[in-house]
Amino acid sequence: MNTHNLPKMLYSYSEGWQDIIQIHPTVAKLFVTWVMPMSLIPSAMFLYSMLVTPGAVFPEMVPPLTMAEALVAAVAFYLAELAMVALMASIIQQMGDVVDAKPAYSESFILAAVAPTPLWLSALALFIPSAWINGLVVALAWVASAALIYHGVYPLFKLEDRSKSRLMGSFILTAGVIAWGALLVVLSLAMSMIIGLR
């Protein structure tokens, strides 16, 4: 995927999206070349935040997490992220029924892989040890992800009109918020299990 087109994809129904449609990457290629590396960012930044600036953004653990404990939590979160993208693609495909569309899994996977990109990148804000700044960056990332969803549904699924794409986009955004909440639950459970095993 060409990252130069990503900013245009936030406000355009064609720029960037048409390039992806023409290239039509396979699910496996998009998963390996985009989803896997991008999903590493939040996991790596979580490790950084817990080990380098403990307590600055996330609550500080007492006693502090060891490198091995933080690594286990980060790996669990990474695997959950990968699984969630595949699951979201399946949910998006099923949501086509809402607007009488029958999107292929490959198109659904493209949207599921592209839409969380701002959220993945927002984790880089953890270099700044401030919960307020990180909260603001995550909020802006959600706005950008919503824009990608709303502008991606129309060209990817070849819908008849924009009102149908907005309707489907709203359903996808709602599912995305739930998925994001589920990822945070997975991270919390991983942390609880690690603390419980001490």
Image: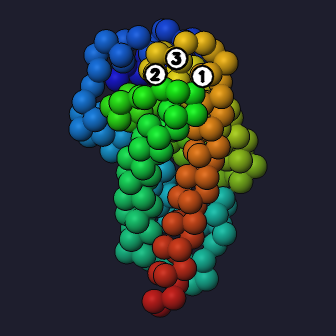
Q: Amino acid at mark 2?
A: Phe
Label 3 – label 1 distance at C-alpha: 7 Å
- Residue 129 sits above or below residue 58 on the image: above
Pick the residue in front: 13 or 76.
13
Which residue is the site of mark 1?
165
| x and y percentages locating residue 170 in the rendered image | 66, 34
Q: Secondary structure at mark 1?
A: helix
Numbered label tally:
3
Which residue is the site of mark 3?
159
Which residue is the site of mark 2?
157
Q: Is residue 114 visible?
A: no
Image quadrant where residue 66 sits:
bottom left
- Residue 69 sits above or below residue 100 on the image: below
Q: Is residue 119 visible?
A: yes
Residues tagged 1 and 2 counted as in contact (Cβ below 8 A): yes
Q: Earlier in the sequence, mark 3 or mark 1?
A: 3
Residues tagged 2 and 3 counted as in contact (Cβ below 8 A): yes
Q: Amino acid at mark 3?
A: Leu
Taking the spot 30% from the left edge, 39% from the top edge, the residue there is 31
Label 1 – label 2 distance at C-alpha: 9 Å
Q: Secondary structure at mark 2?
A: helix
| x and y percentages locating residue 138 in the rendered image | 65, 43
Residues tagged 3 and 1 counted as in contact (Cβ below 8 A): yes
Q: Amino acid at mark 1?
A: Ser
Q: What's the colour scheme? A: rainbow
Pick the residue in front: 113 or 2.
113
